Image: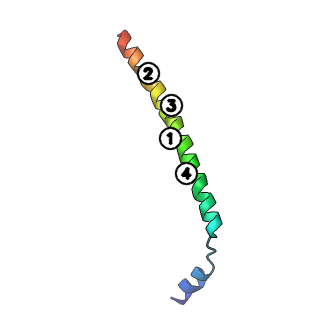
């Protein structure tokens, strides 16, 4: 248990400001990726529907 306490004391916790800025960055990145994948999915869906309508 003593080793666990020693290792736990070495942990550096982020400040409140670091946590907030990292959370905002992650949220923005998730939004950008969601829009990107929505666009790719819509494009592929359109291509597949077009190809199937030709058959």
The residue carrying mark 3 is: 39
In this rendering, the answer to whether 1 lies above or below 54 is below
Q: Residue at x 57, y 53 (%)?
A: 26
Viewer-nearest of discs 4 and 3: 4
The residue carrying mark 4 is: 27
SS for callout 3? helix
The residue carrying mark 1 is: 34
Calculate the distance from the C-alpha at mark 2 to the C-alpha at mark 3: 11 Å
Mark closer to the chain start, 1 or 3: 1
Q: Quadrant of the C terminus?
A: top left
Calculate the distance from the C-alpha at mark 2 to the C-alpha at mark 1: 18 Å
Mark closer to the chain start, 2 or 3: 3
Mark closer to the chain start, 1 or 4: 4
Mark closer to the chain start, 4 or 3: 4
Question: In the drawing, does residue 54 fall left or right of residue 34?
Answer: left
Q: Residue at x 45, y 20 (%)?
A: 47
The residue carrying mark 2 is: 46
Q: Where's residue 18, x and y in %?
A: 64, 64
**Is disc 1 in contact with disc 3, using a CB cutoff of under 8 Å?**
no
């Amino acid at each position: 248990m003593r080793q666990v306490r020693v290792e736990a004391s070495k942990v550096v916790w982020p400040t409140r400001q670091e946590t907030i800025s990292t959370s905002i960055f992650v949220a923005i990145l998730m939004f950008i990726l969601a829009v990107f994948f929505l666009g790719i999915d819509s494009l592929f869906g359109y291509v597949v529907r077009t190809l199937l309508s030709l058959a």
